[in-house]
Amino acid sequence: MSGKVFTVGLTGGIGSGKTTIASMFAELGAYLVDTDLIAHALTAENGTAISAIENAFGSEFILSSGAMNREKMRQRVFSQPNEKKRLEAILHPLIREKTEAAAKESTGIYTIFVVPLLVESGSWKQRVSRVLVIDCSEQTQLQRVMKRNGMTPEQVLSIMQTQANRDQRLNAADDIIASEGTLDEIKLEVRRLHDKYVKLSAEAKTNNTQCL
């Protein structure tokens, strides 16, 4: 993707503020492709992945509505790492296909891929022009998710342990936004990076035109 057009991969741990900050970029003219939303659509009622999930895991993992039983699946994959890999083998190719199709529909100045597990996936770093990490302390993540989802500390920590740690994300970053500042400070940083991305996007288009 990065060789043809300018793209950004936006990531961060659970509770980091990815969705809020991605929306700020969208308001300035970026086009968002959210892989979490795509994954949810694939496993929703009549989703593309439902048949394969039922064949692989059994009908007990499918609700009467026809959607995947997320709670039951979450318990299974957290307790059995091999089952997580089985689910990923079904979902990841479909997510990639839908993601690339969505990117082709981009009407923004540039495209931002919102990818919670960007660092963990291993391939996204090569697929985007720049990686933007939304950063905050692990304590802030814990407090935000407990408040937002009503989870216990143990539940939140168990999710955090399946994700890259803070240092790993920061090491993968080309750009960083600290999400523990004030709203005005965050908006200022979003605007600064947006202006930078607009410029880089224009340069990429110029270079591609010259190569034609």
Image: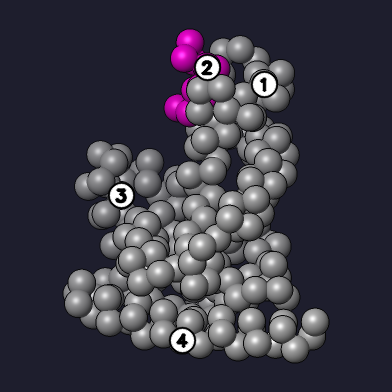
Give the CA separation, mark 4 to mark 1: 43 Å
Q: Could you tell which of marks 1 and 2 lies nearer the N-terminus?
A: 1
Residue labelled with disc 2: 66
Give the CA separation, mark 1 to mark 3: 31 Å
Dot in front, 2 or 4:
4
Amino acid type at mark 1: Ser
Amino acid type at mark 2: Gly
Q: Could you tell which of marks 2 and 3 lies nearer the N-terminus?
A: 2
Q: In the image, what residue occupies the spot 53% across and 66% down?
A: 111
Residue labelled with disc 3: 145
Q: Could you tell which of marks 4 and 1 lies nearer the N-terminus?
A: 1
Dot in front, 4 or 3:
4
Please say whether residue 114 is visible from this viewpoint.
Answer: no
Dot in front, 1 or 3:
1
Dot in front, 4 or 1:
4
SS class of the residue under badge 1? helix
Q: Which mark is residue 36?
A: none
Q: Where is residue 86 in the image (x, y as percent from the top left)?
A: 71, 34
Give the CA separation, mark 2 to mark 4: 44 Å
Residue 173 located within the stretch drawn in magenta: no
Residue labelled with disc 4: 196
